[in-house]
Image: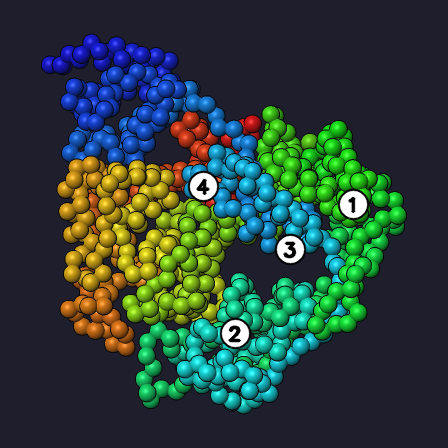
Amino acid sequence: MRVARPIRFVVWMGVVLAGASGSLGGAEPEEFFRTHCLKCHGTDKSEGELRIDQLGSPRLETMETWSTILERVESGDMPPQGATHPDQETRQQFVKWLSAKIAQISRPVPALRRMNRVEYENTVHDLLGIDVPLADLLPEDSQVQGFDNVAGGLGISSILMERYLEAADVAFEATIRRIKPLPPQTRRAELMLLKDNISSVEGNKGGVIASAGAFVDFTPGWPPARVDSAHPIEDGVYRCRVAVWPHDPGDHRTLTVAIFTGPLFGPGKRVFQGMFDVTGTPDEPRIIEFTTFLKESHALHILPWIYPEHVTWRDKHESRPGVAIAWAETFGPLDQEFPAKSQRMLFGESDTLSLVEGEGVYIRHRRGVKSHYVESSTPEQDLARIIRNLAPRAFRRPVDPELTDQFVQLALSRFQQGSTFEQAVRAGVTAVLCSPHFLLLNQEPVVDDYTIASRLSYFLWSSMPDEELMTLAAAGKLSDPRVRFAQVERMIADPKIERFIDNFTGQWLDLREIEFTTPDKKLYPEYDELLLRSMLAETRGFFRHLLQEDLSVLNFVDSDFAILNQRMAEHYGIPGVRGHEEFRVVELPDESIRGGILTHASVLKVTANGTTTSPVVRGAWVLDHLLGQPAPPPPPGVPAVEPDIRGATTIREQLKLHRENESCNRCHARIDPPGFALEEFDVIGGHRDWYRSLEGKGPRIEKTNYYAGLPVESHGRLTDGRQFERFADFREQLLEQPETVVRAIATKLLVYGCGRPVGPGERASVDAVVDDAAKHDNGLRSLIHGVVESELFHRP
């Protein structure tokens, strides 16, 4: 016999279901609430303060609560363990029904936002043709839903405007080459002739010896072999060359050098130029060559890496390998244009303009050097022309003459008040670069072709539209989906797509945080600069490969290939990969645990500290970044669970005690299982069966300073009752619900690509992207096309 329901509930359901739309009919959501919700949230003994039977229908005042209900049901948090759970189809139908109700009342978030500091730097570089650091002059940007290019997190303050004024001034100065460059020259250092000048290298433990016309560095890593006498004596772009060969490497070792450029002495940023395999012979050494910008007195810093010499101790009978460095040289400056190309881009190439010699400048290695400044024979006409040409490019659309006149009049007034021509141009350009029309995106109330051009370019290039996009916008062709499709394909093929790869993976996968911690050298002696750089290159290369080939995003969960060099392959126990410099597609052996980003050393490092791993941190990361179902923050006053680094107590035992608190257990039941599965991987992504310990009772591992600690326990139970014994089982279970993963990645791309938060009210846009990608095997590039065609992308 069916039990009668309280009248209050019947009335409430009538209110909630009024105007219901979607796949669920009136009786079905009523049955869902009655079966799965009201036992705990429909009586006077309701847990906490939530009474669903008193909540009323979704409206603006209660939308946050209804959104929380939606998130908890979709993620599986509710109903709790021990209660009657709906099957997956019923759960999804309920989620769609409630999403539709919330969408009816939600207020769209405006897309208006300012550029973040990376976008600002890229835009100014592309606008003025310069290459000078600007992002570091601006404050850090805040994140919304995991990204720093989202409306709601990018406000403007008086302090920020001061920084913009400073950055604009630096940018303007960079457009003018003040001193005529020296003719290109070669500065070469023959290291055999510099023995007395490299004491900083020679003093290292292991030393440097002469061998066959070269110096041999036996000491891997920092401090580097610094080649001082090859440094340039003037800022500019230089071609750098280094001759190296391997000294007595043996059959089982490979030698690599990481090359940095930076200051000779003291603090200062050193720029990573690349990893290069050391090959060749004394008679025919390998010539490493690259082109880069160098400041006066910047030196080449050459770091040898002798693998696996630095990971384990070398036996006494083994040969002593090293990197032989024969010579190094710089040639340049290569950029000889005077006036500079950037000056011509900004000022134009009018016959009325000239570079005029000014005051003398002291330069240690040159005499009689004069600085130059820009002058005009028709200053007022040139001022107006320069500003009128700059404004539409800077504002990324045609500009009303009345608006342009404001900037022209500012420049003219400065000139008429006694400023020089160049100072007046600086004032006008700075005003343009600090204008809201330049700094803000999506200002227009209606989305037109110029808006689409900017949205495409800031999505995929983190910068302003190029000439082709602007030409198409002027012709009104970007309203055509076929044209947009072709443009997305072109933009993905452009080298500037690396900005998207770096920025998106840097935030989605937290790769920007990879250097936040340094693994303990006693516990993880194999960690080094080469491994760090290889970690990043692997994950970016994996993302790039999926993008270029339009492969399924389910490869992020599991794949039968990886993008590896020798350093990563040996770190993962995969044979047959030789060479550290080149990353290539490697088919994974059937027995390999690798495959998917959860086994990438980069991801495993950013979800750990330098000593220990935490199932809580990693589990929460998986829920948010890969499944799109973030766990709520812990209750205030609840201390974090710190792993026992002495190896006496396992993290599982500690969490078991922690979960005895019911308020903690509710979330940890969902957080901990993915984290337990990932306990099979250490802080640098190595696979393990036991924890490393500095005070373990187990045996000391040969040629190391650590011991075998307690065994790893990676089994777990998901909230829906499914159990797994090992990480591989857990990964298979993730693939049993592919739509969850595809939806999560589609949502991340929509947030990043549209620059606005994506909530329950935007579920229709997410559904459209997911449905369209399903026709193309859930390809990553297809998802990007789906984002560009989504209603959210074209919403004002």
Circle nearer the viewer, 4 or 1: 1
Distance between mark 2 and mark 3 Cα atoms: 25 Å
Which mark sits nearer the N-terminus, 1 or 2? 2
Circle 3 packing at 10 Å, graded few (<14), some (14-19), many (20+), is some
Which mark sits nearer the N-terminus, 1 or 3? 3
Task: Identify whether 744 is placed above or below 564.
Answer: above
Which mark sits nearer the N-terminus, 4 or 1? 4
- Which residue position is annotated with label 2? 302
Distance between mark 4 and mark 1 Cα atoms: 42 Å
Which mark sits nearer the N-terminus, 2 or 3? 3
Circle nearer the viewer, 1 or 2: 1
Distance between mark 2 and mark 4 Cα atoms: 37 Å
SS for dot 1: loop
- Which residue position is annotated with label 4? 143
Distance between mark 4 and mark 3 Cα atoms: 26 Å
Distance between mark 1 and mark 3 Cα atoms: 27 Å
- Which residue position is annotated with label 3? 131
**Identity, as a three-letter code, of the amino acid under mark 4:** Gln
- Residue closer to the observer: 40 or 610: 610
